[in-house]
Image (cartoon, rainbow, N blue to C red):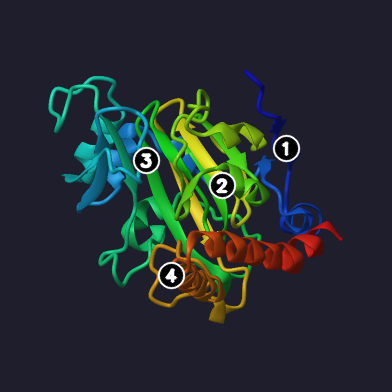
């Protein structure tokens, strides 16, 4: 079988704001940042400490019988547990109490109090833990959109997807493998919305997804205290090699009017892009009214117009 091209994510040490802004950010490529002061969280956030200092509230979690979460086909359940109970379960290999099976996997992606209105903010949802966490000050405070607290069972894998905002993935405890794909390889990822249909990226079904082999993968491993810069639109897939805790910090890097003000998750396409996709859907429905020969001809003309408009600009 033909091998997929691979590249290791470039690593930077002792990064401060000036170095990040001047040397790293303009490249618009993932970057592994080491040696950043994240506060006392990397030492304090043991299972017992998290259970005792997290929150008294219950949390909504993903529960899956297998390690690979599939958001397209929804192969998981949503359940709620007291946070302290959840943390201890997520750290276990086998469970005495469970929803599906004794080896089920758990995943927490923190939410606002009312997910329809409130944005994830570690200072609000987990105020005691937030005191231990020092946010890398690489951007203006008013640019910050959300700070998402995450916990994963060992071996849990998140589906390949992209985000529309730049973000820092801060690995506080545990070890995590991250595989990324460039936005320019979107044509090879078999997208359904913002997610790839290719679940097993290490042993893909190339009869079903033959073009996937053309996508170049960028890889890195995050250890406690590491920070991964993920530029907007870069696809990423993560595997928790150990029980792990992290914080995702998302920030707005486009003008504020580009973002949907009702979007509390930060994953809706920028408004101009959303309008363009709606127009495209209407155009495709209109072409469907034509006989097959005309459909083929005008579909090709539409593709050519897009290529002439954008691809030549990208190559210049």
Quarter residue 139 falls in: bottom right
**Which of the two residues, 199 or 18, is positioned nearer the viewer here?**
199
**Which of the two residues, 126 or 21, is positioned nearer the viewer here?**
21
Q: Give left or right: position of 172 versus 66.
A: right
Helix or strand or loop: what does disc 4 sit on? loop
Which-is-in-front pick, marks 2 and 1?
2
| Residue 151 marker | 3
Q: Position of residue 132 (x, y in %)?
A: 45, 49
For label 2, the residue is: 235
Which-is-in-front pick, marks 4 and 1?
4
Q: Disc 2 and disc 1: Cα gap in Å?
A: 19 Å
Q: Disc 2 and disc 3: Cα gap in Å?
A: 20 Å
Q: Residue at x 37, y 66 (%)?
A: 119
Helix or strand or loop: what does disc 2 sit on? strand
Q: Position of residue 289 (x, y in %)?
A: 43, 70
Q: Residues within 10 Å of mark 4 (few under 14, many from 20)?
A: few
Relative to 60, is 287 above or below? below
| Residue 19 marker | none
Helix or strand or loop: what does disc 1 sit on? strand
For label 4, the residue is: 289
**Which of the two residues, 272 or 311, is positioned nearer the viewer here?**
311
Q: Residue at x 14, y 33 (%)?
A: 99
């Amino acid at each position: 079988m033909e091998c997929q091209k691979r590249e290791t994510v470039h690593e930077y040490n002792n990064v401060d704001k000036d170095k990040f802004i001047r040397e790293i950010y303009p490249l618009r490529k993932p970057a592994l940042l080491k040696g950043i002061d994240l506060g006392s969280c990397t030492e304090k956030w043991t299972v017992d400490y998290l259970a005792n200092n997290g929150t008294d509230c219950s949390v909504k979690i993903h529960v899956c019988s297998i390690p690979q979460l599939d958001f397209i086909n929804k192969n998981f359940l949503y359940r709620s547990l007291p946070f302290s109970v959840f943390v201890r379960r997520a750290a276990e290999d086998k469970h005495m109490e469970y929803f599906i099976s004794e080896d089920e996997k758990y995943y927490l992606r923190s939410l606002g109090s009312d997910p329809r209105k409130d944005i994830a903010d570690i200072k609000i949802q987990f105020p005691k833990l937030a005191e231990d966490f020092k946010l890398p000050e690489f951007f203006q405070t008013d640019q910050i959109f959300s700070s998402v607290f995450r916990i994963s069972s060992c071996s849990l894998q998140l589906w390949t997807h992209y985000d529309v905002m730049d973000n820092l993935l801060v690995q506080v405890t545990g070890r995590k493998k991250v595989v990324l794909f460039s936005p320019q390889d979107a044509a090879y990822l078999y997208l359904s919305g913002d997610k790839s249909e290719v679940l097993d990226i290490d042993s893909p079904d190339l009869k079903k997804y033959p073009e996937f082999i053309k996508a170049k993968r960028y890889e890195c491993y995050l250890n406690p205290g590491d920070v991964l810069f993920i530029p907007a639109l870069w696809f990423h897939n993560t595997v928790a090699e150990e029980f792990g805790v992290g914080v995702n910090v998302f920030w707005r890097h486009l003008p504020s009017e580009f973002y949907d003000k009702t979007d509390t998750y930060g994953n809706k396409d920028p408004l101009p892009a959303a309008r363009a996709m709606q127009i495209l859907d209407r155009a495709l429905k209109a072409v469907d009214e034509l006989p097959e020969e005309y459909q083929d001809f005008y579909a090709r003309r539409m593709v050519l117009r897009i290529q002439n408009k954008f691809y030549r600009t990208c190559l210049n």
